[in-house]
Amino acid sequence: MNFVMPPRSKVGYLDRDIAGEGDGVVLSDGEKVSFTPPPVKSAVPDISAVKSVVRYFHRVGFTPFPCWIYHPTKDPILVYDQEESSEYGVIYRETSADERARYGRAHMYDWREDTEWRPSPFPKDIKFDPNKQYAGKNIVWPQTTGAAMQDALIEKLIPQVAASVAAALKLANPQAPANVEPKDWSAFQEFLAWQKAGEATREAVRDVVEDNATEPSDERAAWLAEAERLEIKVDKRWSTERLKSEIEKAAA
């Protein structure tokens, strides 16, 4: 069944006392007081009226002075007006029509050609350290791949293992003692050959790894050599990072 809106003549009207029930408050003595609900408070506190920070709000325009001016070798100076800034060759001027079209600014800082003072700081020279991660490209140290190391290991391992096995078999007495079975003596000879081959294998692997891998000890040795060149007295308890910092201080 669809709802049909009844005509106004059958609905009646809302009593004024009921309609305006929330507009006023009746006190205990019968006095009626109008009531206006307070505004909704913001979740973020408004600090624009705090005296210590009010100057940072509702600001318009731009004040070019006072401002700091900078020199590549001298300490920065705070200038308070155009006249004082002009003594150092830095001015605040109106832009030309071409500059306004290019930069969209009506005024800008400028400086004379015969001065080294500037309205913005000079970039600091940062010494490049290849061992630190920077935002740009990094040095990739050459590393020996697994295939190259495997080839070097095989090339060095096979002759050493073969020589060790041959030496073990020659040193072993081909004739078994009287109280030992020939079968057991042959097994003992094979064990000696296996032992010699294992020692030769471990020796060869150690040599190849030391020759092809870059270890922290190699880096420390290079820094120690640099410290010796700079005649820095090195404490053995220093870490590699401490050693690098001392060398950088001495070289600066």
Image: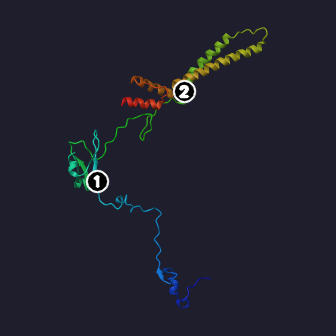
Q: Residue 74 at x, y = what percent?
A: 28, 40
Q: Which amino acid type corresponds to the residue marked 1 in the rendered image?
A: Tyr
Q: Residue at x 55, y 88 (%)?
A: 11
- Tell me: 248 left or right of 151: left
Residue positioned most to the bottom: 9
Mark 2 or 1 closer to N-term?
1
Q: Name the side, left or right, on which 112 lies relative to 128.
A: left
Residue 170 in the image, given as x and y percentages of width and height: 66, 10
Query: Could you tell whether 86 is left or right of 44 in the image?
Result: left
Location of residue 5 by image quarter: bottom right
Callout 1 secondary element: helix
Which quadrant, please, contains the N terminus?
bottom right
Locate residue 64, reporting x and y percent. Answer: 27, 53
> Which residue is denoted by mark 1 in the rendering?
103
Residue nearer the viewer, 44 or 35: 35
Relative to 184, residue 29 above or below: below
Residue 208 - label: none
Q: Which residue is mark 2?
A: 149
Q: What is the crowding at mark 1: few (fewer than 14 residues within 10 Å), some, or many (at least 20)?
A: few
The three-letter amino acid code for the residue at tag 2 is Met
Quadrant for residue 181, please give it: top right
Question: What's the residue at 45%, 62% (across, down)?
Answer: 45
Work out which quarter of the rendered image holds the C terminus and state it: top left
